[in-house]
Amino acid sequence: MTELLHMKNNYEKRFEAKIIEVLENGVVLDRSAFYPLKGGVQNDIGMLVINGKKFIVTKVSETNGKVIHTLDKMDGIKEGMETHGEIDWNRRYKLMRLHTASHLLEAMMHKKTNCLIGSGKVSIDGSYMGFTIEEMNRPLIEQAVSDANKLIEQGAEVIITFVEREKALLDSNMIKLASKLPPLVKKLRVVEI
Ligand SMILES: [Zn+2]
């Protein structure tokens, strides 16, 4: 398992870690600040310094709780080596802002129409969201966008808390999402705006 540093502090740009598994074209670390591709949000990229050498992290994914950092080369990397990691902060910060903005817009749409959120994608080239609404209503969507922008301009606070899966299943506001999550997810990271 990789300890996900971004769960506790999503402003962590640099970190120290140990290589716990060497794969054909990547490594698994004991802890990582890199955000893997998940939940429709694009992964981080960046670099790892191992044995004084710089390796480019070209892709980050997650399987069974392990974060896999795909590297541009594998020269002499061995299990147990220490590494210093750095994420591409400009890219991550843009993704973070887009991600928060997309949830804010979802909340505004839900408030107005009680709609369900169909699908969504947050990526560096642009993001989209799908809403299930009875009929297309452009003024309503524009109003939701302007409401969301107003909240952002006011500098609404973003509060992060953690809720146990069992507790979330008892909360009418969270049950829909919580019941869809895979059982491996024991704790939910709740973002309140
Ligand atoms: Zn999200």
Image (spheres, grey):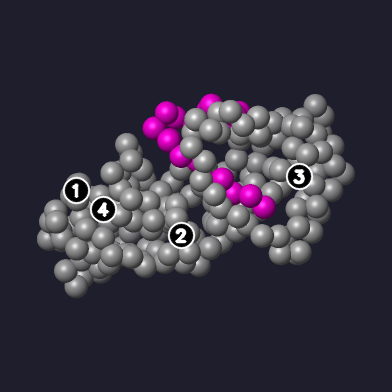
Instruction: Give the residue type at disc 3.
Output: Met
Drawn side of residue 16 relative to residue 78, left or right = right
Residue at 48% x, 49% y: name it. Answer: 42
User: What residue is disc 4 on?
Assistant: 29
User: What residue is disc 2 on?
Assistant: 9
User: What residue is disc 1 on?
Assistant: 21
* SS at mark 4 in the image: strand
Distance between mark 4 and mark 2 Cα atoms: 17 Å
Task: Give residue 140's quadrant in the image.
Answer: top right
The disc, 3 or 4, on the residue closer to the chain's N-terminal end is 4
Distance between mark 4 and mark 1 Cα atoms: 7 Å
Residue at 80% x, 26% y: name it. Answer: 134
Drawn side of residue 97 relative to residue 23, left or right = right
Distance between mark 1 and mark 3 Cα atoms: 43 Å
Instruction: Give the residue type at disc 1.
Output: Glu
Mark 1, other Cα within 10 Å: few <14 / some 14–19 / many ≥20: some
